């Protein structure tokens, strides 16, 4: 039976190799993956990570910390990439900017019976969007600032 750490290492390897179709095999049937503004079932995860890989084709990760528990693992990492593709977020689409950016991510992963039960990815999406130069469009009916 695979440990949470082994499952996480497998998912990271699949992401590096862009072998995303097999990701759901790592997850329990009732599992979920969440990140700011989004929660998906394992079957939907490849599309989500393809979108991020498309927005940052040169995406790289650097492990900065790892803590294991009996039922899971917490991973700290620094993500770095160049924004050359559209990034679709819960706040709207961000057109390619060509900017190189880095952001910190904490992944909290729980495992059950050798499969991922939950994967929660935490990062400051607002800071990432600001670093990309994205500014939300004001709502058409928003009052004008004085």
Image: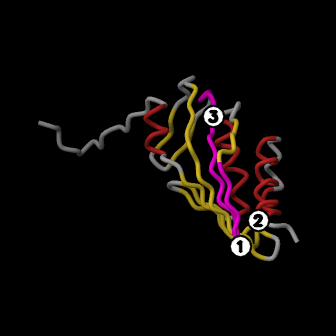
Q: Are marks 2 and 1 in contact (CB under 8 Å)?
A: yes
The percent position of residue 29, horizontal first and vertical second, equals 75, 73
Q: Which residue extends farthest right?
A: 1
Q: Residue at x 55, y 39 (%)?
A: 103
Q: Secondary structure at mark 3?
A: strand
Q: Secondary structure at mark 2?
A: helix
Q: Are marks 3 and 2 in contact (CB under 8 Å)?
A: no
Q: Residue at x 78, y 53 (%)?
A: 11
Q: What range is drawn magenta here? A: 65-84
Residue where numbered disc 3 is placed: 80
Instruction: Tell me how far mark 2 sits from mark 1, CA to CA.
Output: 7 Å
Q: Secondary structure at mark 1?
A: loop
The percent position of residue 76, horizontal first and vertical second, equals 62, 50
Residue where numbered disc 1 is placed: 71
Vertical position of residue 21 compared to residue 140: above or below: below
Q: Residues within 10 Å of mark 3 (few under 14, many from 20)?
A: some
Q: Which of pointers 3 and 1 indicates the residue nearer the eye?
A: 1
Q: Which of marks 1 and 3 precedes in the sequence?
A: 1
């Amino acid at each position: 039976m695979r440990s949470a750490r082994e499952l996480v290492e497998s998912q990271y390897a699949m992401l590096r190799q862009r072998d995303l179709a097999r990701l759901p095999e790592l997850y329990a049937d009732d599992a979920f993956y969440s990140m700011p503004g989004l929660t998906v079932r394992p079957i939907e995860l490849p599309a989500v990570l393809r979108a991020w890989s498309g927005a940052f084709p040169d995406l790289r990760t650097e492990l900065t910390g790892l803590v294991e528990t009996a039922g899971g693992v917490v991973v700290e990492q620094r993500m770095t990439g160049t924004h050359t593709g559209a990034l679709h977020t819960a706040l709207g689409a961000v057109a390619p900017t060509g900017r190189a950016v880095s952001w910190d991510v904490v992944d909290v992963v729980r495992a059950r019976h050798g499969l991922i039960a939950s994967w929660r990815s935490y990062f400051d999406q607002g800071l990432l969007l600001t670093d990309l130069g994205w500014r939300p469009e004001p709502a058409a009916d928003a009052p004008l600032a004085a």
